Image (cartoon, helix red, strand yellow):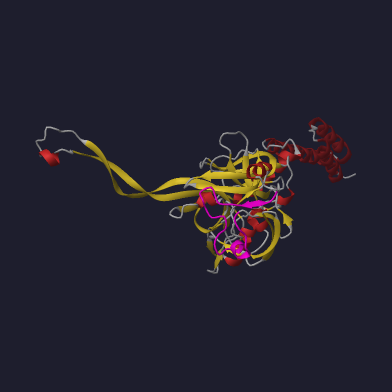
């Protein structure tokens, strides 16, 4: 056996057992000295000492690194690490008036400068405007060229300016490309950085972007991760929880008198704080399965996210036609429940009752697809293109499966008579 072969065996032994054998090294070097002479033994001893030092250095470096305790913990760490570069903060700025206070002598106008009523009245007046941060939210990049998905209520103000901050601290002016007329979703655009290469040609730097998952296969109890700009201050804050419910319907409200009913949303106990709106909800594979949108103020650990599959059509439409459009039927309705059946003395316990809005809005929009098809106030829409309308299968959910100009069949109950009507769906934009 040569010196090199013996060194290799010792190295393999250390790697397998992960022990330091300084004493053994001294003994081995002595044996080598007897077998191969003093020079060979000295060289072997030097090499072994060098190996020990290298091993100690590696061990010291490894001791400074955190070792995940479970496979799930490792998956969370990996997901956050991979997705965070594509999660952004959205800052809202606006021109707001600068107000200054001044004082007047109201009675001088009547009594002159020698008026016995020498007291001042405070007044305010505008002295120009200034740009001021008025809010913030979250979003995430969905394409290499800078498409950003967020909530509609984050970018609701058409008079405001929006700036996107990436995880590396860079900022980009953002343009609102479109707001979803049905879902609490909006798509923004930020421009890629231009880089000049050695030949003087311009190239564009791609943005990191997220991987999109499938929200149709989510399970209650599944672990999820929320990332966002909490409170508009703490960027890329991470919270972990589970899916607490699926198919929820909520009425969300926000600034600028924003009120919207959102159907078929995900409920989660992962903390969603103010400013998290528009951020991604991830599965353990690091795929986006939802867009964080709302939380219940008077509750703990109840937050909601829009399933990512609802946003896929928005992203595709922006890329294809540059806007977001929906099929439009043109009816206001209430889902028939046991309570509504009893209240209205209805003959069925499912369907969509066509009726006026809470503020007296028309039940059927004039000249709409529903109007042209012959749907009237008081009708109960039982089926939409062969699918039964229930609380879990709402009319709005069914309509969204189609495109403008699609022809659909509608089963309607009018009094005691069932009718089959045909409608050509219209187009609904923002």
Q: What is the count of numbered marks?
A: 0
- Image coords of residue 362 (percent x, y): 54, 55
Magenta region, residue range: 350-377
Extreme residue toward the top, this view: 23
Identify the image quadrant of residue 25: top right
In the foreground, 306 or 135: 306
Place of residue 223 in the rendered image (x, y in percent of width and height, measured from the top left): 71, 41
Measured as percent of width and height from the top left, residue 251 is found at: 58, 44
Tell me if 233 is positioned left or right of 382 in this view.
left
Q: Reply above or below: 180 against 286.
A: below
Q: Position of residue 95 (x, y in %)?
A: 38, 51
Q: Is residue 2 above or below residue 159?
A: above
> In which quadrant of the rendered image does the N terminus lie?
top right
Depth check, front residue: 251 or 151 = 251
**Left or right: where 97 falls relative to 30:** left
* Image position of 68 (left or right of 182): right
């Amino acid at each position: 056996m040569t010196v090199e072969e013996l060194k290799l065996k010792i190295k393999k032994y250390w790697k397998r057992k992960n022990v330091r054998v300084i004493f053994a090294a001294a003994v081995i070097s002595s044996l080598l000295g007897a077998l191969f002479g003093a020079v060979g033994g000295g060289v072997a001893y030097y090499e072994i000492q060098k190996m020990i030092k290298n091993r100690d250095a590696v061990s010291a470096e490894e001791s400074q690194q955190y070792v995940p305790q479970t496979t799930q913990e490792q998956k969370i760490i990996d997901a956050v690490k991979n997705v965070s570069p594509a999660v952004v903060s959205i800052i809202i700025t606006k021109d707001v008036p600068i107000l200054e206070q001044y004082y007047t002598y109201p009675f001088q106008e009547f009594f002159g400068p020698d008026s016995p009523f020498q007291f001042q009245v405070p007044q305010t007046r505008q002295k120009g405007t200034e740009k001021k941060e008025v809010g913030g939210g979250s979003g995430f990049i969905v394409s290499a060229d800078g498409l950003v998905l967020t909530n509609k209520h984050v970018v609701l103000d058409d008079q405001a300016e929006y700036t996107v901050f990436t995880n590396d601290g860079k900022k980009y002016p953002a343009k609102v490309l479109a707001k979803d007329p049905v879902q609490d979703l909006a798509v923004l655009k930020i421009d890629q950085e231009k880089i000049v290469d050695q030949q003087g040609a311009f190239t564009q730097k791609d943005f990191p972007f997220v991987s999109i998952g499938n929200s149709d296969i989510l399970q209650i109890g599944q672990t999820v991760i929320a990332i966002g700009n909490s409170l508009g201050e703490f960027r890329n804050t991470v919270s972990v929880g589970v899916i607490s419910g699926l198919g929820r319907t909520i009425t969300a409200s926000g600034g600028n008198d924003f009120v919207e009913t959102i159907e078929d949303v995900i409920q989660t106990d992962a903390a969603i704080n103010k400013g998290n709106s528009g951020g991604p909800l991830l599965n353990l594979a690091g795929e986006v399965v939802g867009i964080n949108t709302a939380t219940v103020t008077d509750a703990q650990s109840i937050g909601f996210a829009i399933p990512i599959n609802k946003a896929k059509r928005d992203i595709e439409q922006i890329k294809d036609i540059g806007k977001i459009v929906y099929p439009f039927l043109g009816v206001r309705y209430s889902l028939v429940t046991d309570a509504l059946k009893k209240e209205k003395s209805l003959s069925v316990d499912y369907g969509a009752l066509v009726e006026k809005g809470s503020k007296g809005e028309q039940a059927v929009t004039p000249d709409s697809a529903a109007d042209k098809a012959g749907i009237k106030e008081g009708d109960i829409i039982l089926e939409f293109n062969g699918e039964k309308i229930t609380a879990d299968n709402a009319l709005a959910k069914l309509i969204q499966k189609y495109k403008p100009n699609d022809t659909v069949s509608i089963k309607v109950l009018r009094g005691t008579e069932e009718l089959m009507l045909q409608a050509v769906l219209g187009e609904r934009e923002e």
